[in-house]
Image: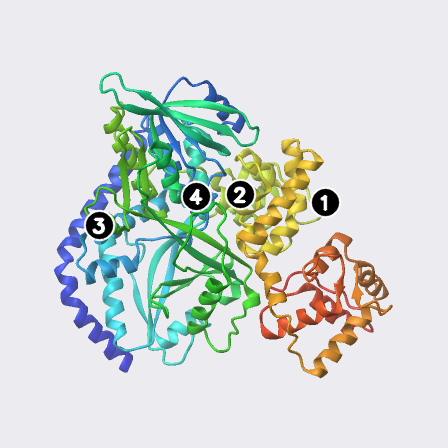
Amino acid sequence: MAFQKAVKGTALIGGGAIATVFGLSQFSQYRNKHGTFVRVQAAEAVTVPIKSHFPTREEQILALQTTSEFDVLVIGGGATGCGCALDAVTRGLKTALLERDDFSSGTSSRSTKLIHGGVRYLQKAIMKLDLEQYKMVKEALEERANLLEIAPHLSAPLPIMLPVYKWWQLPYYWFGIKLYDIVAGSQCLKSSYVLSKSRALELFPMLRKDELVGAIVYYDGQHNDARMNLAIALTAARYGAATANYAEVLRLLKTTDAASGKERVCGVRCRDVLTGQEFDVKAKCVINATGPFTDSVRKMDDQEVPNICQPSAGVHIVMPGYYSPDNMGLLDPATSDGRVIFFLPWEKMTIAGTTDSPTDVTSHPIPTEEDINFILNEVRNYLSVDVEVRRGDVLAAWSGIRPLVTDPNSKDTQSISRNHVVTISDSGLVTIAGGKWTTYRAMAQDTIDAAIQAHDLKAGSSKTIGLQLQGAEDWSPTLYIRLVQDYGLESEVAQHLASTYGDKAFEVAKIAQVTGKRWPIVGKRLVSEFPYIEAEVVYGVKEYARTAVDMISRRTRLAFLNVQAAEEALPRIVDIMGKELNWSEQKKKEELEAAKKFLYYEMGYKVKSDQLTDSSEISLLPSDIERYKKRFHMFDKDKKGFITILDVQRVLESISVQIAENTLHDILNEVDLNKNGQVELNEFLQLMSAIQKGHVSGSRLAVLMKTAEENLRQRVVIPVDRSGGGL
């Protein structure tokens, strides 16, 4: 009864306000319906022919070297840079793009994976009567609709629950969320709605029950950010843009304008990072779309120019999928320090973040223990006491750098702009900075419009609204069924391929290896608990992957989902890539080490070792210590004080269990802190202590030793797959 009264009160409070914007909503719906018609027209208006396949990287490098002059040269292969290249090339401009690392290797692959307008920005717009914030939200909601339409295989609407724990907050949040729907107009994904306490707990059973009043559910979009970025790059390449990853800009080229006598940027000197070869690329217009590295390129143009980028680090963590429902996210609108935390299902795992703290610009941001624990503490505040939120359940963690900017054209140059900023230097360098993932297309359109005007380029209007990205053309929600029926793939693998490659999934299926089993017929997995298959590594090389890190983090997303699984897959990935790219044994060894270093520092693997060493104080009861010593000495028959692979193999053989030697090596290596090839008693006790504290979970060595002890008489096969625990 109280809940019904609250809902009625909510309607009365918000009704008048909504009525005042109803006219605006109707106009918005008309405009957006008209916009849908324009969207179809714009996509059909592209006169540039599209190739059936994108060129090889070698062909792209050759095009960069042999083209006398491009109309537009974009520096930066993130979402915005690739968006600029696609916008330019579909207008008929001769376009090039250079990225010193891999496509989406920076901020664009380390986002919250949301395609959203920004509920909190709308709140600020209303509270502060900020028209610019409102316009930013409006634009983002329009771009959200477009992005869901042009890449439906990589994106989908996601319901997000906002739990309410105080009665007065119900009308407050309801009004704000309803206004979010209204601003979206006809492009509102689905209408938001209010839930009772019982219904909220039914949909999100992990939620904290104490003092829960009810909840509000609204819809935003979610995507696979790195694959979306790559789809934009590949689409641009198919339309004729000369795009190259691992092509580093060393300096800007300049020429003196005959009419004005001023120096003008006319191209770049670049280096193929993979071969070391240097060459010039000439262009009428050079665009700086380098995100956090915006100022470094601006200083290539003018050493005296003041910095405009204000970098901010955002950390995310990934936890097992059982922490959230399969299809319902959670928003914490007011954390202990005023920040916003999202708790979302993603790729059958749970992603939580983000933080917001000042940082230095670096190519290799590292997640901190402080930020990880902040996120975990906020998650604990919203989950039931029945759910033990363990530090050891963090499967991966990463940090991304937001390129917030101050507008140099504004009177208040110290004020951070939440919107994007396009500037043109005296020498003609065009810089696009700021903004957000969702609005990459609008940012690119504004940038190319400015470039055309500043450099007098001959081109029409933008053609990218409604322009389908790589894989979208013949995709359908049931495409995966054809993959199962035609090729004999596992259903889970087929669904993964369809949602990753769209209609190009058939190209991956065609090169999938026969398993030799009754079922599945084809598709050898890289690791048992994830649907990534070996054929994706071969196809990833065609998609310009050139390092093992490219493969585990951006062609597949293994590194972002489970770093231990990624490390296990590495040897096979390196072998396949080595065959495709003719790597020497030394090169394969270097790639393996570089990828392990990436996992260790940038994806949170270091945290695992830190958790064990930081808990070197063995806080176990004497009875527990004796119990664990007995378990240890069951393997250490010779009382050496340590166990090796041979010790483990001996015990397993005694109970007729066989595990591959390389698997055993991986299992021991997870606990071997000093990396001397053996696990000492003290290391084992540290592990068990950390497990009791919740700092470490899912240790395969602990599970194996316990199971062996219990089954020495029963002769039961010991499972060694990860149990869901992590770092």
* Residue at numbered disc 3: 135
Pick whichever, 450 or 677, lies toward us: 677
Q: Position of residue 584 (x, y in %)?
A: 69, 33
- The answer to whether residue 521 is visible is no
The amino acid marked with disc number 2 is Arg
Residue 366 seen in this snapshot:
yes
Earlier sequence position, callout 4 versus callout 2: 4
Residue 411, compared with residue 699, is above or below; it is above
Q: CA distance from mark 3 to mark 4?
A: 25 Å
Report the mark closest to the observer, 1 or 2. 2
Between the residue at mark 2 and the residue at mark 3, the CA separation in whole angstroms equals 34 Å
Q: Which residue is mark 2?
A: 555
Horizontal side of 584 relative to 328 (left or right) equals right
- The mark lying in front, picked from 1 and 4, is 4
Q: Secondary structure at mark 2?
A: helix
Residue 516 numbered tag: 1
Mark closest to the chain's N terminus, 1 or 2 = 1
Q: Which amino acid type corresponds to the residue marked 4 in the rendered image?
A: Met
The quadrant of the rendering that contains the N terminus is bottom left
Residue 137 vs residue 312: left or right? left
Q: Which residue is mark 4?
A: 228
